[in-house]
Image (cartoon, rainbow, N blue to C red):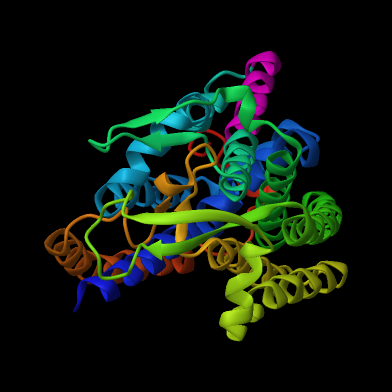
Amino acid sequence: MDYATLKFVWWLLVGALLIGFAIMDGHDMGVGTLLPFVGKTDIERRVMINSIAPHWEGNQVWFVTAGGAIFAAWPFVYATAFSGFYFAMMAVLWALFFRPVGFDYRSKVADPRWRGFWDWGLFVGGSVPPIIFGVAFGNLFLGVPFHFDNTLRVTYTGGFFDLLTPFPLLCGVVSLAMLVTQGAHYLMLRTEGEIALRSRKAAIAFNLILAACFAIAGIWIAFGIPGYVITSGGFADAPSDPLAKQVIQQTGAWLANYQHYPATMLLPCIAFAGMAIGLLAALRNKGGIAFIASSLTCASVIGTAGASLFPFIMPSSSHPQSSLTAWDATSSHLTLVVMLGVVLLFLPPVVIYTSWAYRVMRGKVTSTFIEQNSKSVY
């Protein structure tokens, strides 16, 4: 496989890992976000926790694998992102710390104050990462203030609070609403009674919020945010050198791929269709259909962002020439070949095992089950 094709394949694979994270770990985080609000009693909250307890650790692997893939396939992106988004990434890690500790220790002490603390800890672990990831994606459309010197040493010139501007915050709302909807649909599928009814109401509300904010973000990108265009250099088969190209900003540039490749218009259309189907399924109390629809929405929303940015991965607002793309931020040809072989070898067993685990542990989690197994479940 030639170098240019490998670069594109790895752009697709990283996108697939992000989609896998949004669908699989996303419903875990959505349930955690809803925990203090949908669960009104301790038993109800334990039902919610145990609906995701058997799978959340395995789902976390999607997040870890995506980070590892970015490190190995796009080393320039990994180094630059973790320099520029350092405090944001640390905030994600600090929030995620609440998840394993909260799951394992919440129900070991019967004190309501103890359990209430960990309920809110699980809320933080479920809500903070999606918001930060959405804010990070929003900043990619605006451009990130970094540049390379002649030795390709990166310098980041922004600060943490510079990331918190209106458009990235809107993207944070999109991300959170998307994963909360996913979690609410999952609870409709795995629970019953009052929990399922409250989850249904949450799914309807957050689905509407997602549709509105996603539409606003699209209009904002079309008319209010200049995109980036490569004017020379930056060819797909060229060596990985971020400075070997010229880049300018241009109004409407983030929509150029939809004009050049009309098939990409299917992505936002599928996203809105998934929202509509998910909303109708929630209104009719069809949890399985709703979950499939919101999974499709997650994939299409992420795909829309990727298609709009392509080939840019991390544009630079302070020095456009330093912008990182799928063509000039990659590892060597040999590294990409070896990693592709590893993916083809290990990904199918992971997907098969995950599918088997969900099939074996399918069914409703009920209050009666929690009461009868109080000492052995979370």
175 vs 57, left or right, is right
Q: Which residues are magenta?
A: 111-125
Residue appearing at x 77%, y 53% in the figure: 224
* Most foreground residue, 279 or 358: 279
Residue 138 visible from this viewpoint: yes
86 vs 225, left or right, is left
Question: Relative to 147, is 115 above or below?
Answer: above
265 vs 238, left or right, is right
Question: Relative to 106, is 230 above or below?
Answer: below
* Most foreground residue, 152 or 3: 152
Q: Indicate the quadrant where residue 248 lies.
A: bottom right
Counting from the top left corner in percent of width and height, residue 184 is at: 72, 54
Residue 370 visible from this viewpoint: no
Question: Relative to 171, is 164 above or below?
Answer: above
291 vs 8, left or right, is right
Q: Indicate the quadrant where residue 123 lies.
A: top right
Residue appearing at x 68%, y 39% in the figure: 33
Q: Indicate the quadrant where residue 301 lies.
A: bottom right
* Most foreground residue, 109 or 155: 155
Residue appearing at x 79%, y 52% in the figure: 199
331 magenta-colored = no
Question: Relative to 123, is 286 above or below?
Answer: below
Counting from the top left corner in percent of width and height, residue 5 is at: 28, 76
Return the residue found at the far bottom: 263
Counting from the top left corner in percent of width and height, residue 152 is at: 27, 38
Mostly what secondary structure, the magenta segment?
helix
* Most foreground residue, 252 or 308: 252
